Image (cartoon, rainbow, N blue to C red):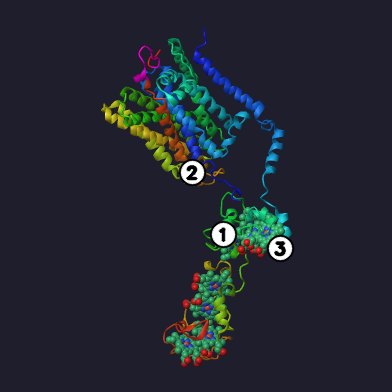
């Protein structure tokens, strides 16, 4: 009976977490693809890290949806009873394709040589695991390795549009809600995509610096500066797109503009103007421009990159919040603002969201142990050539 | 060109996945998942297998005719008993096994009647903070026949103690209005329209001066200039029981 005539927020914080996670997947993958497809040699050191990051976040990305819908045991039905008229239902296929068709296969080809070697050099359970992961393949002939290399390049080429699809799709789902003026915009998929790229790059940058601190490894500053450059470009494009979206709305001045203005200047002021725009976009923009124009020393640059990446990650989370929650904070008759009260415990609560945000890092820690990205540098037996280091 | 070894292995994995999917689709999963009619039949079967938790109004009526009649004649006509009392099939089967709860808390009513701008025009709603805060709704409204209680027409309805005190006093025959001017609004929204109260000695003097002309005047009179000094009379006499001494 509590549901008599409801008109409240139905998409809660988990639906904020979900585009945040998929965004990082798409962004990290696109960063990785720069190495393979565009031969950006400088970024080579983070290639494998970016792939593992994408995989860790991908494995968690579907969970918020499962928890929100509340029947994970029925999820498979999406695939067995395809519903081509539902954008949300078809997303299952996009997700599956990206996970199985792109990410896992790419990582497999990339790591096959290492897996074979690791299986040879370890014993017991680990040997079993590595052999199984390598699908019991043994062939390390130069032709086979060259094939791995070609295959992973080919998959990356297919992977780029797929990653675009993955996150553009999330934007599409919001952008196609024409009854909601805060969401319904053709720019939405591109805005989502650009912000995904920004967040993915920021996440890899953050992890790269963090790992080097934790594991006491030397950072490749050339690589970091290059990532910084890509980050700068991505932020500029993202900023231009979002600014365009707002200016367009203001100029069009449709009937919803009154309530949206009220929304932005009251309920979303902190999360949109302060966190998303000032802290998450303009401040990083200024810092990244400064880093490129002034000659700071290495330590300071590291520190600036680290804080910038954190700010950006916070800003993009805010952006997801502003879209998802913001779009439900005014009545659909445009007559007034509504409220969203976040639960602290329970299924769709703050605690669940925090757990889901922490989970990818735990998975990444496991993957990082299992598939050390830099293993080949120290273990590669002489005589076997290392195609991953050789760029063709 | 010879097919590289790893492609064969990957191919086997993919073939296994495809085979599992096909197996699931055509052998293991029931047809009812894919086509409408068997799907509906299966859904009906699945639902019917669930234990019954609600008995329905008709069953309640057999034993609770009184509540049923009351509710049926009132505004809650369309609300099922178990909407408020919770699923009660086990109680209906054996009335002593389990007694349905009585939802006396304010929240139970506010779920439907708490103010929410999105409810349709005219639906009776109250602001929980303003509408008799903290008092249980059922002290004033009968849940089975929820007419808004009628506002009392007599002062006794709300000022019973004063009325009773006065009735035992020498002022018993005086109507309240002889000392208080009461606006009609006070009877429904008392705090929004407070009556007047005597504000000078002359109000009492009207009846208690020697040779007073008021038809209700008292036989007992006092010297207004001297009696009680300059104090207002009710410093010493409680007006609703004037002979009592403070």
Residue A295 x %, y %: 26, 26
**CB atoms at circles 3 and 2 under 8 Å apart?**
no
Image position of B223 (left or right of B56): left
> How many labels, in total?
3
Q: Residues within 10 Å of mark 3 (few under 14, many from 20)?
A: few
Quick check: do tags 1 and 2 share a chain?
no
Chain containing mark 1: B
Could you classify mark 1 by the number of other residues whose Cα lies within 10 Å: few (under 14), some (14-19), or many (20 or more)? few
For marks 1 and 3, the one nearer the N-term is: 3
Q: Which chain carries label 3?
A: B
Say whether residue A286 is magenta. Answer: no
Classify mark 2: helix, strand or loop.
loop
Residue A80 appearing in the image = yes
Q: Which residue is disc 1 drawn over?
A: B105
Between the residue at mark 3 and the residue at mark 2, the CA separation in whole angstroms equals 45 Å
| Position of residue B50 measured from the top left corner of the image (x, y, whole percent) | 67, 44
Are the numbered discs 1 and 3 placed on the same chain, yes or no? yes
Q: Mark 3 points at which residue?
A: B66
Viewer-side residue, A28 vs A189: A28
Q: What percent of the width, then of the height, locates residue B240?
A: 53, 81
Provide the major secondary structure of the magenta segment.
loop
Q: Which mark is residue B94?
A: none
Q: What stretch is highlighted in magenta?
A: A376-388
Which type of secondary structure does the marked residue at label 3 adopt?
A: helix
Cα distance between the residues tagged 1 and 2: 27 Å
* Residue B195 visible, this orientation: no
Residue B213, percent from left and from top = 56, 87
Q: Mark 2: few, some, or many residues within 10 Å (few <14, many ≥20)? A: some
Give the alpha-carbon distance from disc 1 to disc 3, as whole Å: 23 Å
Report the residue marked by disc 2. Answer: A349
């Amino acid at each position: 009976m509590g549901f008599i005539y409801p008109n409240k927020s139905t998409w809660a914080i988990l639906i904020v977490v979900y585009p945040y996670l998929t965004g990082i997947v798409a962004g990290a993958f696109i960063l990785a693809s720069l190495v393979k497809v565009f031969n950006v040699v400088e970024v080579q050191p983070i290639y494998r890290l970016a792939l593992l990051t994408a995989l860790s976040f991908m494995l968690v990305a579907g969970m918020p949806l499962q928890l929100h819908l509340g029947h994970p045991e029925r999820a498979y039905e999406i695939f067995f009873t395809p519903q081509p008229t539902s954008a949300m239902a078809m997303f299952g296929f996009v997700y599956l394709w990206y996970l199985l068709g792109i990410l896992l296969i790419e990582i497999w080809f990339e790591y096959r040589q290492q897996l074979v070697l690791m299986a040879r050099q370890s014993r017991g359970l680990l040997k079993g695991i590595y052999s199984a992961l390598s699908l019991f393949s043994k062939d390390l002939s130069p032709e086979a390795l060259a094939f791995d290399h070609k295959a992973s390049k080919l998959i990356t080429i297919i992977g780029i549009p797929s990653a675009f699809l993955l996150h553009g799709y999330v934007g599409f789902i919001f952008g196609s809600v024409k009854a909601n003026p805060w969401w319904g915009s053709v720019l939405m998929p591109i805005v989502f995509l650009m912000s995904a790229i920004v967040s993915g790059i920021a996440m890899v940058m953050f992890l790269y610096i963090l790992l080097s601190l934790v594991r006491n490894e030397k950072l490749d500053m050339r690589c970091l500066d290059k990532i910084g450059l890509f980050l700068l470009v991505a932020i500029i494009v993202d900023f231009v797109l979002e600014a365009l979206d707002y200016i367009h709305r203001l100029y069009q001045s449709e009937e919803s503009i009154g309530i949206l203005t009220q929304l932005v200047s009251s309920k979303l002021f902190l999360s949109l103007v302060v966190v998303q725009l000032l802290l998450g976009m303009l401040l990083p923009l200024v810092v990244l421009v400064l880093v490129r124009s002034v000659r700071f020393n290495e330590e300071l640059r590291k520190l600036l990159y680290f804080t910038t990446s954190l700010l950006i990650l916070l800003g993009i989370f805010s952006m997801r919040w502003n879209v998802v929650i913001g779009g439900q904070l005014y009545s659909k008759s445009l007559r007034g603002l509504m409220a969203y009260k976040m639960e602290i415990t329970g299924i769709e609560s703050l605690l669940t969201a925090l757990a889901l945000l922490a989970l990818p890092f735990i998975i990444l820690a496991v993957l990082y142990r299992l598939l050390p990205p830099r293993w080949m540098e120290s273990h590669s037996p002489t005589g076997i050539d290392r195609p991953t280091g050789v760029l063709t | 060109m010879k097919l590289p070894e790893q492609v064969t292995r990957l191919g086997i994995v993919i073939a296994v996945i495809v085979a599992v999917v096909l197996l699931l689709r055509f052998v293991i999963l029931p047809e009812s998942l894919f086509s409408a009619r068997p799907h509906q039949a299966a859904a009906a079967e699945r639902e019917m297998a669930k234990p019954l938790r609600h008995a329905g109004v008709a069953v309640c009526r057999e034993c609770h005719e009184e509540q049923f009649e009351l509710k049926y004649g009132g505004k809650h006509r369309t609300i099922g008993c178990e909407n408020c009392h919770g699923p009660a099939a086990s109680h209906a089967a054996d009335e002593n096994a389990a007694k349905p709860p009585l939802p006396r808390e304010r929240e139970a009513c506010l779920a439907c009647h708490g103010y929410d701008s999105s409810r349709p025009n005219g639906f009776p709603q109250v602001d929980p903070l303003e509408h008799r805060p903290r008092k249980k709704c059922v002290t004033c409204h009968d849940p089975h026949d929820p007419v808004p209680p009628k506002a009392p027409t007599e002062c006794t309805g709300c000022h019973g103690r004063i009325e009773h005190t006065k009735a035992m006093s020498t002022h018993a025959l005086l109507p309240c209005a002889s000392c208080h001017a009461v606006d009609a609004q006070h009877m429904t929204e008392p705090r929004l329209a407070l009556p007047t109260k005597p504000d000078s000695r002359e109000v009492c003097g009207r009846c208690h001066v020697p040779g007073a002309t008021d038809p209700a005047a008292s036989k007992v009179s006092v010297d207004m200039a001297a009696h009680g000094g300059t104090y207002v009379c009710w410093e010493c006499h409680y007006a609703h029981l004037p002979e009592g001494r403070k």
